[in-house]
Image (spheres, rainbow, N blue to C red):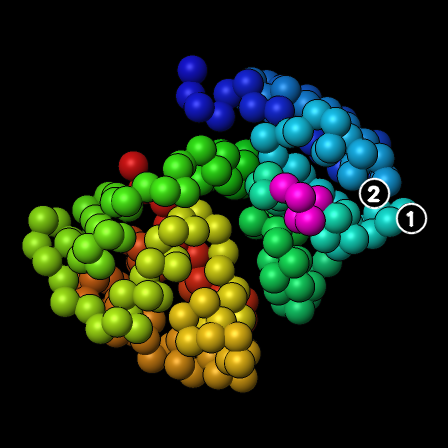
Amino acid sequence: MTASQGARILVVDDESQIRKLLKVTLQAHQFEIHECMDGEEAVAQAGIMHPDLVVLDLGLPGMSGMDVLKRIREWSQVPIIVLTAKDREEDKIAALDGGADDYVTKPFGMGELVARIRVALRHAAKSADEPVLRCGALTIDLAQRQVELEGMPIKLTPTEYDMLKVLASNAGKIVTQRQLLQQVWGSHHNESDSHYLRVYIGHLRKKLNEDPAQPRFIQTEPGIGYRFLMQD
């Protein structure tokens, strides 16, 4: 049994057909499924059952999905994957900046959703106090601020290291441009300074011997941000 099997997932969607599809498919992957169809019930159920992950539709009647996200984030860091018919970049960015761990746009493939769920659960299961991050051939020693690739040390500038640390600490999740700018350069920076990111991401990729067209570590999410790819 993998760590994700048996995980309790709260599915929040007002469309009964979507809920049925998710329930049948996710149960077949050994997940325990709980359902609700509106925002108020979702907030209440999240507080009662303490799910391991929430699949949340943004287009809910009554309390909106964004409000549900905000309410849950007031007290819980449970992984939340947004499931939405909205495909505008600004909607995705708003959800991610609001605390969502990932998003999947309707219509969606169940294989993609299951993969995203497993990544989110694996990330949540990792200790936040882990002193050394290991991502395939890459090792990041947080205590010593040292990075090795295939056993060989990599010399990074302080800014390059801070960017890599933020991305690797959120492996599997999308880090928006705004989140990355503010965590590395401070809260006074916003998306208008995104040219900083392109320059430093380019430096990092070069030092990690990475081909942007076939990334091993840093994947660009166009117009949104970056995702550090999880590896065994």
Which residue shows up at 52% across the image and 75% down it?
Answer: 187
Image location (x, y in percent) of residue 28: 59, 18
The total number of labels drawn is: 2
Q: Quick check: can you spot residue 132?
A: yes
Q: Quick check: can you spot residue 18?
A: no
Kind of element beneath mark 2: helix
Residue under label 1, please give it. Answer: 62
Instruction: Please tell me which residue lies in front, 31 or 155.
Output: 155
As shown in the figure, which amino acid type bears the numbered disc 2?
Gly
As shown in the figure, which amino acid type bears the numbered disc 1?
Gly
Crowd tier of the residue under label 1, counting other residues whose Cα lies within 10 Å: few below 14, some 14–19, many 20 or above: few
Relative height, residue 12 to residue 183 (above, below): above
Q: Is residue 74 magenta?
A: yes
Crowd tier of the residue under label 2, counting other residues whose Cα lies within 10 Å: few below 14, some 14–19, many 20 or above: many
Kind of element beneath mark 1: loop
N-term-proximal mark, 1 vs 2: 2
How far apart marks 1 and 2 lie (CA) works out to: 7 Å
Of the 4 image quadrants, the one containing the C terminus is top left
Q: Which residues are magenta?
A: 72-76
Residue under label 2, please give it. Answer: 39
